[in-house]
């Protein structure tokens, strides 16, 4: 555990400080964040797209005054992109520079007498050993997000975004980093974190993450917010919308989510919708307003058709 | 029993409900509660959920068990262990202590009226804390029945009859809509909101009743009935309407998960021939030395899939779900054709293509030609018709998938035709939604068919279906 104490005093403190950054957390979210801080464990946030998983990490960064280091996962992400890489171009240059220097040096010595050849060889060997030690030093190490986060001495939030998109091997890579906060580089040894970063992993659950990874994390299932909280969120982002409109907007969005849709509207889309109806100057959410702006929240033709028929839009 | 023992008992109960909890996670849970303290029940719940409940699938079981093992109150709920509860406890005085059995009918009626008024306000605001408080008090007042000395039972329907939240809908609508015009979008949405809240209230009542029963009879007795099976283990044939809606909602995420896993597996498999151009291109970075060879990916073999499914009565929900899933996975196959039958067969591929899969089954039932004689399953005739009408459907590249319980009403099986069909296909599988032990009993004709297909697979729930589909698709 880090020696500099904890970032938050209690659950209410988490809630309060997240609110200051504009993120409205409910009690479950605040408690889990608080625990992640107290137990020094990574936090795995899972939930449908657009419920504010990444947003939580950003808000947290601001709340604790840290810097955000982000590792965006994608198919084919590997060690070289996530952890570290040797800068082989620079290494090649170094070797070539060494090689072009060495013959002259050796020729200078060997030119005097043939007996000195053995000395010349040993000099070449020493040069190589030197070069070898040299090219596997910090200077040639390219630090990628995971290593960077571990080596920082200032407060850091490490966001590993969309973990489910990465391949299974990447999870194996994460295990060492997340359980011991250390990275082993064969040529340099094990680098241990001087100050534990606050780690947040997000996942859309397109695939099940491995048990081993989940065991090392605290788990937060982020779902769509309650009506009251969503209304508050909409109002905090689009205050001009007004209490009444926000309420009916949220109500409609919630009934849309209750349908069997391919893609349920996200919080971000609710906010977009609020901005849209505001910009278009609607003052009630009536049939016309909803029908003409439905595309903001529903992005599949079949979803729109279904919503229109179930809400009986355009019937009267 | 102290709180630590209680926690351990709770983890044991979670494991009994098929929620995997490792010992390390139990330790984490205890440390987590140590950090938040026992004072606030919801914080304790969040702490346990964060450490022990790591799939959304487990959440229902987790919540039911948490309510059983860590009830907010004991008995009638006279503020025992109530320190964390802030809202509602002020008003609870009028309902919680009073309704002992000696209330006269008039008093009881007055109490009922008062509580209905409170319920209306709470439903209007959508205030969950107040609703929960009301649920607790209404169970105390109206749910109990004495059966035998010192033994009480609680009934959900008694509470619901007394409170009858449905009769409040008109009032609530009026209050919620205000001066807004009726009949418009506003009203429909409001109606839905109200019915959602009423449903939430009913759920609260049933969990409160469960808690009381647990106190009367001991937790273990209630645990079995209280915890619903995990969604991927719900039996297709016994699924309730609500379960089915939930299952259908899972089709797309499930298909997406399966597809990702399959592509991942494929990529991991052997790579194909050397890609000369890309290898040379990559070697430029290392000064012309080809340190890494690049290979062309293997072309995956995509099978053709023909699904022949029984859509009669009880099996329909299983067929529906499986059709939706195979359709959602259609990119993994080179071609998907679907045929449905009851006592005769018709092609239903065109319904799969429709925009809205939710209504698929209704349209299949009304538009496809599935009934020939009496509308009871007739596998023999259905197979004959299939072979005759669509002779080109099953070819050497086809995987034939038959969905059904093989309950043939003691009719002819057309086993010879079926055998020929299976011989033509590359693979043939039969998915049976009945438990294996029922096969061959009564009018089940599994015996006549099982030998001809490559395998007859028991497929009672989503978990088994998922395993099967994974096997079916080539890696």
Image: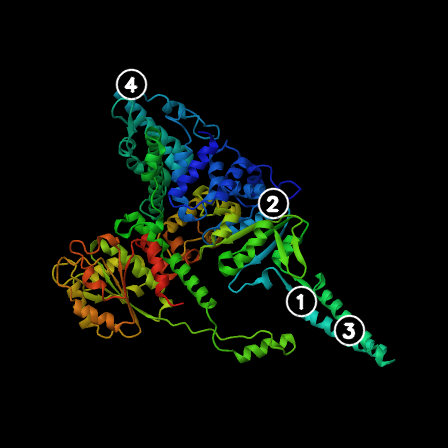
What residue sits right under mark 3 in the picture? A124
Q: Position of residue B174 (x, y in %)?
A: 33, 38
Crowding near pointer 4: few (<14 within 10 Å), some, many (20+)? few
Q: Earlier in the sequence, mark 3 or mark 2?
A: 2
Report the disc number at residue A87. 1
**Residue drawn 54% across the image and 56% down it:** A161
**Residue drawn 39% across the image and 33% down it:** B132
- The local secondary structure at tag 4 comes to loop
The quadrant the C terminus of chain B occupies is: bottom left
3D distance between C-alphas at marks 4 and 2:
57 Å
The quadrant the N terminus of chain B occupies is: top left
Q: Position of residue B390 (x, y in %)?
A: 21, 72
Report the disc number at residue A63. 2
Q: Position of residue B299 (x, y in %)?
A: 42, 74
- The local secondary structure at tag 1 comes to loop
Q: Which one is in front in this view, the residue at disc 1 or the one at disc 3?
A: 3
* Residues marked 2 and 1, same chain: yes
Q: Which one is in front in this view, the residue at disc 3 or the one at disc 4?
A: 3
Q: Give the answer, above or below, for where A130 lies relative to A2.
A: below
Report the disc number at residue A97. none
3D distance between C-alphas at marks 2 and 1:
36 Å
Crowding near pointer 3: few (<14 within 10 Å), some, many (20+)? some
3D distance between C-alphas at marks 1 and 4:
85 Å
What residue sits right under mark 4 in the picture? B102
Q: Pinpoint the chain carrying mark 1.
A: A
* Residues marked 3 and 2, same chain: yes
Whether residue B127 is visible here, answered yes or no, is no
Q: Which image quadrant is residue A11 in? A: top right
Along the line of sight, the residue nearer the viewer: B193 or A289? B193
Along the line of sight, the residue nearer the viewer: A161 or B286? B286
């Amino acid at each position: 555990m880090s020696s500099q104490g904890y970032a938050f005093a209690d659950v209410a403190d988490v809630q309060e400080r997240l609110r200051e950054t504009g993120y409205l957390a409910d009690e479950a979210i605040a408690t889990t964040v608080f625990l992640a801080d107290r137990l020094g464990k990574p936090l795995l946030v899972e939930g449908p797209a657009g419920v504010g998983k990444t947003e939580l990490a950003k808000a947290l960064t601001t709340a604790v005054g840290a810097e955000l280091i982000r590792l965006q996962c994608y198919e084919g992400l590997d060690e070289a992109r996530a952890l570290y890489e040797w800068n082989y171009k620079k290494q090649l240059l170094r070797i070539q520079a060494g090689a072009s220097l060495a013959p002259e040096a050796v020729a200078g010595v060997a030119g005097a007498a043939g007996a000195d050849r053995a000395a010349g060889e040993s000099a070449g060997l020493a040069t190589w050993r030197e070069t070898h030690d040299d090219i596997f030093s910090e200077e040639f190490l390219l630090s990628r997000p995971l290593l960077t986060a571990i080596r920082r001495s200032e407060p850091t939030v490490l966001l590993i975004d969309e973990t489910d998109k990465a391949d299974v091997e990447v999870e194996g890579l994460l295990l060492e980093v997340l359980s011991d906060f250390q990275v082993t580089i064969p040529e340099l040894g094990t680098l241990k974190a001087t100050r534990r970063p606050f780690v947040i992993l997000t996942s859309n659950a397109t695939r099940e993450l491995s048990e081993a990874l989940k065991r090392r994390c605290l788990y937060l299932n982020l779902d769509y917010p309650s009506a009251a909280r969503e209304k508050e969120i909409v109002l905090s982002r689009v205050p001009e919308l007004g209490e009444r409109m926000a309420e009916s907007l949220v109500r409609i969005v919630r009934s849309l989510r209750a349908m069997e849709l391919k893609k349920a509207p996200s919080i971000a889309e609710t906010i977009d919708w609020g901005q849209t109806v505001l910009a278009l100057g609607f003052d009630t959410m009536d049939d016309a307003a909803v029908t003409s702006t439905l595309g903001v929240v529903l992005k599949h033709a079949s979803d729109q058709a279904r919503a229109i028929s179930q809400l009986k839009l355009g019937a009267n | 029993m102290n709180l630590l023992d209680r926690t351990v008992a709770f983890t044991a109960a979670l494991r009994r409900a098929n929620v995997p909890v490792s010992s390390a996670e139990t330790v984490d849970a205890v440390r987590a509660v140590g950090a938040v303290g026992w004072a606030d029940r919801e914080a304790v719940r969040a702490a346990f959920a964060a450490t022990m409940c790591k799939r959304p699938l487990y959440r229902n079981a987790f919540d039911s068990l948490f309510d059983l093992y860590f009830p907010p109150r004991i008995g009638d709920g006279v503020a025992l262990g109530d320190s964390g509860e802030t809202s509602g406890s002020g008003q609870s005085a009028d309902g919680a202590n009073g309704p002992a059995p000696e209330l006269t009918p008039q008093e009881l009626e007055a109490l009922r009226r008062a509580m209905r008024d409170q319920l209306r306000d709470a439903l209007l605001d959508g205030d969950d804390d107040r609703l929960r408080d009301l649920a607790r008090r209404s169970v105390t007042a109206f749910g109990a029945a004495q059966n035998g000395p010192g033994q009480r039972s609680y009934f959900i329907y008694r509470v619901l009859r007394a409170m009858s939240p449905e009769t409040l809908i008109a009032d609530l609508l009026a209050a919620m809509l205000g001066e807004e015009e009726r009949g418009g979008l506003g009203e429909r949405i409001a109606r839905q909101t109200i019915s959602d809240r009423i449903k939430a209230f009913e759920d609260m009542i049933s969990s409160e009743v469960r808690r009381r029963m647990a106190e009367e009879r001991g937790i273990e007795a209630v645990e079995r009935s209280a915890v619903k099976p995990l969604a991927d283990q719900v039996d297709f044939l016994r699924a309730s309407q609500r379960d089915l809606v939930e299952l259908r909602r899972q089709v797309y995420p499930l298909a997406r998960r399966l597809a990702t896993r399959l592509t991942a597996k494929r990529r991991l498999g052997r790579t194909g021939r050397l890609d000369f151009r890309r290898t040379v291109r990559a070697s430029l970075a290392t000064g012309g030395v080809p340190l890494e060879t690049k290979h062309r990916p293997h072309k995956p073999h995509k099978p053709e899939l023909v699904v022949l499914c029984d859509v009669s009565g009880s099996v329909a929900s299983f067929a529906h779900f499986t059709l939706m899933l195979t359709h959602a996975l259609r990119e993994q196959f080179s071609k998907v054709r679907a045929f449905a039958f009851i006592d005769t067969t018709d092609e239903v591929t065109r319904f799969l293509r429709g925009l809205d899969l939710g209504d698929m089954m209704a349209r299949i039932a009304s538009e496809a030609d599935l009934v020939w004689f009496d509308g009871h399953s007739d596998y023999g005739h259905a197979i004959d018709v299939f072979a005759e009408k669509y002779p080109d459907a099953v070819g050497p590249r086809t995987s034939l998938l038959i969905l059904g319980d093989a309950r043939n009403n003691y009719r002819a099986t057309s086993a010879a035709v079926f055998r020929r069909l299976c011989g033509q296909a590359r693979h043939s599988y039969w998915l049976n939604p009945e438990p294996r032990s029922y096969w061959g009993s009564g009018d089940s004709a599994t015996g006549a068919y099982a030998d001809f297909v490559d395998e007859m697979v028991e497929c009672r729930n989503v978990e088994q279906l998922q395993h099967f589909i994974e096997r079916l698709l080539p890696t």
